[in-house]
Amino acid sequence: MADAHDTVLRMYEGAIRALDTKAQIFLAVLTITVSPLAARLSEAHLPFWTRALQAGFFCAATLLFILCLLPRSGPRGSGMLFDAARSPAEVAAHVAAPDFAVDYAASVGVLHGIYLAKRRRMRAGVVLVGIYVTALSAALVLP
């Protein structure tokens, strides 16, 4: 039976993977739908500012979902295994030391920071997709 520390670490890893999967799904949907929607917008002969606004929402949402997939997003603490300022040799020496002990609280803190950074980007991307779809619908329906 796994101990409580491993369970917490696995829960965070699963939550981070779920956010990555959601970002990939949104990116796939945006990629599949952009060409037909762009063609429909150009056929509608909408003003330039409307098309520019749609493109801005689309690009911003796409960028946020791509940023959500970055593996090193989130704060790092100094002196921890997840510290991006440390070289691979330093981490290997730290782990190989006879007095090495895993600081579960620090590991969970780092994972929580990564989760929060990804979640904020995901939430902002979903909001932008909602605005994009609403503005697109309004542009195509309203005269």
Image (cartoon, rainbow, N blue to C red):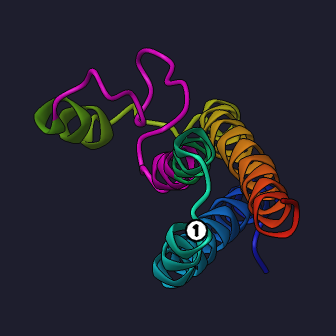
Q: Residue 44 appears at what percent x and percent y?
A: 62, 70
Left or right of 40: which side holds 95? left
Looking at the image, which residue sits at the far top? 78
Q: Residue 119 appears at what percent x and percent y?
A: 73, 46
On screen, 30 above or below 85?
Answer: below
Between 108 and 49, the one nearer to me in the picture: 49
Residue drawn at x 60%, y 65% as measured from the top left: 23
**Quadrant holding the C terminus:** bottom right
Magenta stretch: dominant SS?
Answer: loop
Left or right of 18: which side holds 98? left
Looking at the image, which residue sits at the far left? 89
Left or right of 141: which side holds 100? left
Amino acid type, residue under disc 1 in the picture: Leu
Q: Is residue 65 magenta?
A: yes
On screen, 22 above or below 33?
Answer: above
Residue drawn at x 27%, y 21% as measured from the top left: 85
Is disc 1 placed on a helix, strand or loop? helix
On screen, 35 above or below 117?
Answer: below
Between 37 and 11, the one nearer to me in the picture: 37
Between 116 and 105, the one nearer to me in the picture: 116
What residue is pinned by disc 1? 41
Q: Is residue 108 magenta?
A: no
10 Å crowding of disc 1: few (<14), some (14-19), many (20+): some
Residue drawn at x 74%, y 61% as measured from the top left: 136
On screen, 47 above or below 103?
Answer: below
Q: Residue 48 appears at what percent x and percent y?
A: 52, 44
* Quarter assignment of residue 8: bottom right
**Start-end of magenta stretch:** 59-87
Residue drawn at x 68%, y 45% as measured from the top left: 115
Q: Residue 13 appears at what percent x and percent y?
A: 64, 62
**Quadrant holding the N terminus:** bottom right
